[in-house]
Amino acid sequence: MELIDGLPPSAADMRAFAFAGLAHFTTMRVHRGGVRGLALHLDRLVIDGRALFDIALDTDLVRRRIREAIADEPENVIVRVTLFDPSLTLERPGADASPRILISPRGAPSGSPSPLRVRSTPFGRQSPEIKHTGLFGSLYERRLAQRAGFDDAVFVDGAGRLSEGPTWNLGFVHDGDIIWADGDALQGVTRTLVGGASETVALDDLPRMDAAFASGSGAGIRPIASIDEVAWPTDHPAFDRVRAAYASVPFDEI
């Protein structure tokens, strides 16, 4: 059940959230009350809460709010935790903040997601180190890519480096090793749990890569079939190793 501060949201609550220009979040996959990398998700909320709202977030309270919201949900569910403060106005976003906690569960996808055909585009999220709700630019680029016949977009930063997708990190397989595009991007939880080195990857470097994939807490590891005209096999043996590494991470009880 969707809850704000432990209570069902009113129409006024959701209207306030809709107009909240400053907000940050994390999204996690919950299985039987546990989360892989729970501490990383909570750390993200603490760090982003300090950066955006200048607060010291109570993570025990966040965990309690999640438990309340998933009490009647299925054993597999995607949970988004959003912090926003409707009292911060367009005129006074610099006022002292007291963020509210919105917990939004939704059904977890089943099965393996299909490989992605991706189009590169010059773009970069503002403050990419923060998982904020300012998604217009990212989703607009995704829409443009889909309207052009692709499944998604991938961003190239101002230095010519591949960085990230609209809602996922970008990884590659090169000579059997897992590497991550080191352009300006969010440090995703799944990326951290899987591990691997970061490396500058430009569009001209794509042909020397053996495979590519997207990572995120919802879909896990998702093969990328192509970026622009460069195509890769979507059944590379390294994917089994990456998925096994992710699957070996224990679930932390909320």
Image (tube, helix red, strand yellow):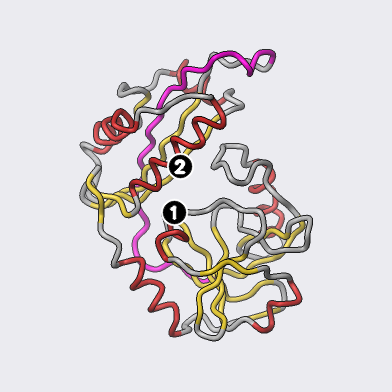
User: Is residue 152 shown left or right of residue 131?
Assistant: right
The region drawn magenta spans 91-115
Residue nearest the observer in this picture, 31 or 40? 40
Residue nearest the observer in this picture, 128 or 111? 128
Is the residue under label 2 in contact with that under label 1 (CB below 8 Å)? Answer: yes
Please say whether residue 20 is one of the residues in the magenta stretch. no
Q: Main secondary structure of the magenta part?
A: loop
Crowd band around label 2 with a 10 angstrom C-alpha radius: few (<14), some (14–19), many (20+)? many
Q: Which residue type does callout 2 highlight?
A: Arg
Return the residue at label 2.
Answer: 44
At which x and y percent is residue 202? 73, 70
User: Is residue 253 shown left or right of residue 226?
Assistant: left
Which label is found at residue 189?
1
Crowd band around label 1 with a 10 angstrom C-alpha radius: few (<14), some (14–19), many (20+)? many
At which x and y percent is residue 209? 62, 81
Q: What element does badge 1 sit on?
A: helix
Name the residue at 57% across, 37% down: 133
Q: Quadrant of the N terminus?
A: top left
